[in-house]
């Protein structure tokens, strides 16, 4: 159990070459239980939120060159019993990771820093930027950053009608 703390009675039985019921009985007698994974984090405030007005541009467009369309998302990593969040910005054409950010909390500044790092690294601002509709990407800070770009080419579909007609 010390070498493999996640082993339950079936794996302990195989490792010790004993009957599974015996391993379970001994584990129960001495209070030995396998380590459990941490639960998936979620934000209760995100439940039931309405969709944003941005269309899914990945289904509408197909990039034909690098730095035309970027995509971003973040995930969590359980590290030493705590969650660490990783946000990445990818070039959809090449699949290259252009920017990233690692943090113990996930908020709009966490996402915005990854986007800024991608822009600083490449020196180019994409024509399109795709993300999910999470609260971090829908926040005022990120939406303001999208509307008031750092460069002229940094544009996002603001309204569904404009995006459907290709006007940005």
Image (spheres, grey):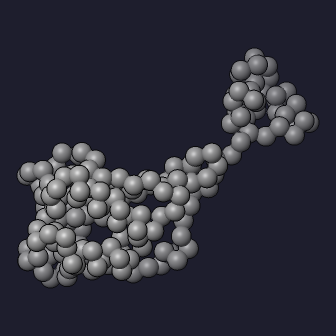
* Picture quadrant where residue 60 is located: bottom left
Picture residue at 29% right of the left edge, 57% below the top: 117
> Residue 96: percent from the left, percent from the top?
24, 45
Vertical comparison of 147 with 104: above or below: below
Residue 139 in the figure: left or right of residue 121: right
* Residue 83 visible, this angle: yes
Near-viewer residue (52 or 123): 123
Instruction: Give the residue at the far right of this rendering.
Output: 29
Vertical comparison of 132 with 75: above or below: below
> Residue 27: percent from the left, percent from the top?
84, 34
> Residue 9: percent from the left, percent from the top?
76, 32
Picture residue at 24% right of the left edge, 74% below the top: 146
Residue 102 in the figure: left or right of residue 167: right
Residue 143 in the figure: left or right of residue 92: right
Near-viewer residue (65 or 22): 65
Picture residue at 30% right of the left edge, 64% below the top: 131
């Amino acid at each position: 159990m010390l070498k493999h703390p996640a082993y339950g009675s079936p794996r302990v039985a195989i490792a010790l070459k004993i009957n599974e019921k015996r391993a379970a009985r001994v584990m129960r007698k001495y209070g030995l239980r396998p380590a459990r994974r941490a639960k998936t984090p979620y934000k209760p405030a995100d439940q039931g939120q309405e969709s944003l007005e941005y269309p899914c541009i990945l289904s509408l467009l197909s990039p034909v060159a690098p730095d035309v369309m970027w995509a971003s998302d973040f995930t969590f990593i359980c590290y030493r019993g705590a969650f660490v969040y990783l946000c990445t910005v990818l070039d959809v054409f090449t699949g290259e990771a252009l920017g990233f950010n690692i943090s113990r909390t996930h908020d709009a500044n966490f996402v915005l820093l990854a986007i800024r790092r991608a822009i600083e690294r490449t020196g180019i601002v994409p024509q399109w930027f795709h993300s999910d509709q999470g609260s971090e990407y829908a926040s005022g800070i990120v939406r303001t950053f999208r509307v008031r770009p750092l460069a002229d080419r940094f544009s996002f579909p603001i309204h569904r009608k404009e995006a459907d007609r290709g006007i940005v």
